[in-house]
Image (cartoon, helix red, strand yellow):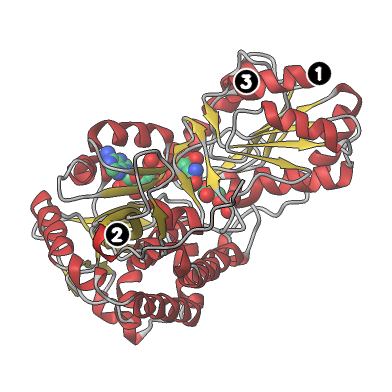
Amino acid sequence: MIDIPEFSIMKEGVNYKYYIDGKWKNSNSGKLISVYNPYNSELVGNVQACTKEEVDNIIKIAHKNIECWRDTPLNERTNAINKAADLIVEFSEPLGYLLMKEIGKPLNSALSEITRTAEIFRATADSSFQLSGETILGDVFEGFSREKVSMTYRVPLGVILCIGPFNYPFNLTGSKIAPALLAGNSIVMKPPTQGPLTALHFGIILEKAGVPPGIFNIITGRGSEIGDYLTSHPGIDMIAFTGSSQTGKHLAKVAGMKPLLLELGGKDAAIVLDDADLDNTVKAIVSGAFSFSGQRCTAVKRVLPMPAIADDLLKKVTEETLKLSIGNPAENKKIGPLISSEQCEYVQSLIDDALKKGATLICGNKREGNVIWPTILDNVTVDMRIAWEEPFGPVLPFIRINSAEKAIEISNKSEYGLQGMIFTENIDLAFNIAQELEVGTVQINGQSSRGPDHFPFLGTKSSGLGTQGIKYSIEAMSRNKVVVINLSERGKLVKQCFTIDK
Ligand code: NAP
Ligand code: G3P
């Protein structure tokens, strides 16, 4: 990895600092949290374990500076966001490399996570028109005249707390930061403890892009130690969170009456009908299930095939899965490590449970270090945990079905409702099934996924609250401000109206 002089200020050796009011600081706790490469356990860096007092200070600073950014003309905020996009691209290689090391994502995917974030920044800047308002005249209701005029415009919410997950620590903090800044908010960002280092670089990037000190701040520390204190803090005006459903639900309880944008877990099911295009379906399922070793909320997490296609589908999916390269993310192997050994043990417990209850092992079920071989299970039944729980690992269960109704029933019985997929040549039927699925998005003949990033992205049930996506995030991070003018009768023009003689 190339050490970039611009970034040297944020760390001493491998010890990264936290970022408050434009300054990089060590925590008074004197404690550090180590970040290890999940593939080879090498130390990648240490971050500060910040204290509650430092949480208080950072929120105070973010508040103190609200007006300065809110009152900055929109075109200047837009310029800063565009400049940040340029800088993200400029530094994409070292950032991608660091990201690969800290979370074990294949190098090419890590690089695209960085460049995708730059694209989100640019598209957000291009969407500044979303902050325009409207004018409404009062005479729609009886008793009100056109002299009552409502003018609405969008104003920021205040201080936004942005919390990201380990699997997209740069992108899923960046996709919150850009709309929050565009809308004129100030920000406290808390990156995930397993993967905080790349996201810390937003401090330097935004400062160089012209975001004034105190508008963007970063606190580091374990969610289990400072999470509740942060989310329940009265100085936080809105929370944008991506992570597990468990943490999301807990957060919603402690946050109180704050607006929330929650992107949580999923158990996306691929319903494959008899007439599906087999090659296209196989490609979508293998890529959807196993990219980043299944550590994506939108991963294909269940296959529900109809009888006439099930055997061929299973055979072809297995053939393609066995071709996936396995090993070092630095060498771009398709299947790499899971984020931690605890996660590997959890995934193994789901495989063991299924096999004990009669599932058929088709391939995989092998582990070396934190790498689990892509595992396919056939004849999975609804009494098995893998039918319902989110593995966040490379395990793909086949639950054979014999009707579209059964597929809908099994899909909808899930506590999650992120995305669903239907593979068929019969678009009318696909559309009808899509109407029945209780999910945020239904993909027809394609794998579940979040992008492109201007599409609405949302989950029902335990999968989330609110809608992400450029336009929708800007909307969620701003509110209407309404000013009603009551014009006086004095200025009214007296008009001569024609009347028709009868
Ligand atoms: P996680 O364990 O829930 O952690 C997510 C973030 O929440 C981390 O920054 C974590 O900090 C923080 N956190 C933990 N406890 C907290 C608390 N009490 N208050 C406030 N913040 C707290 O999730 P993860 O393991 O990083 O990510 C995997 C999960 O996220 C999966 O379930 C996946 O489906 C979901 N996910 C969903 C989406 C989506 O868009 N729907 C996208 C990506 C991931 P620490 O790291 O310090 O604990
Ligand atoms: O798990 C992160 C979630 O947002 C998925 O994103 O682009 O991999 O579908 P994507």
Q: Callout 1: few (<14), some (14-19), or many (20+) C-alpha neighbours within 10 Å?
A: some
Q: Amino acid at mark 3?
A: Ala
Name the one closer to the observer, 346 or 476: 476
Mark toward the viewer: 3 or 1: 1
Is tag 3's residue or tag 1's residue first in the polypeptide sequence?
3
Mark 2 and mark 3: span between their CA atoms? 49 Å
Residue 20 in picture, x, y percent from top left: 18, 67
Q: Which residue is mark 2?
A: 156
Mark 3 and mark 1: span between their CA atoms? 23 Å
Q: Which quarter of the picture shows residue 437?
A: top right
Badge 1 marks a residue whose secondary structure is: loop
- Residue drawn at x 38%, y 83% as measured from the top left: 4
Whether pointer 2 and pointer 3 mark residues with C-beta atoms closer than 8 Å, the reply is no
Q: Outermost residue, bottom direction?
A: 5
Is tag 2's residue or tag 3's residue first in the polypeptide sequence?
2
Q: Amino acid at mark 2?
A: Pro
Badge 3 marks a residue whose secondary structure is: helix
Mark 2 and mark 1: span between their CA atoms? 49 Å
Residue 87 in picture, x, y percent from top left: 43, 80
The relative height of residue 488 versus residue 407 in the rendered view (above or below) is below
Q: Callout 2: few (<14), some (14-19), or many (20+) C-alpha neighbours within 10 Å?
A: many
Is tag 2's residue or tag 1's residue first in the polypeptide sequence?
2
Q: Which quarter of the picture shows residue 299?
A: top right
Q: Which mark is residue 354?
A: 3
**In which quadrant will I find the N terminus?**
bottom left
Name the one closer to the observer, 490 or 305: 490
Q: Which mark is residue 403?
A: 1
Q: Which mark is residue 241?
A: none
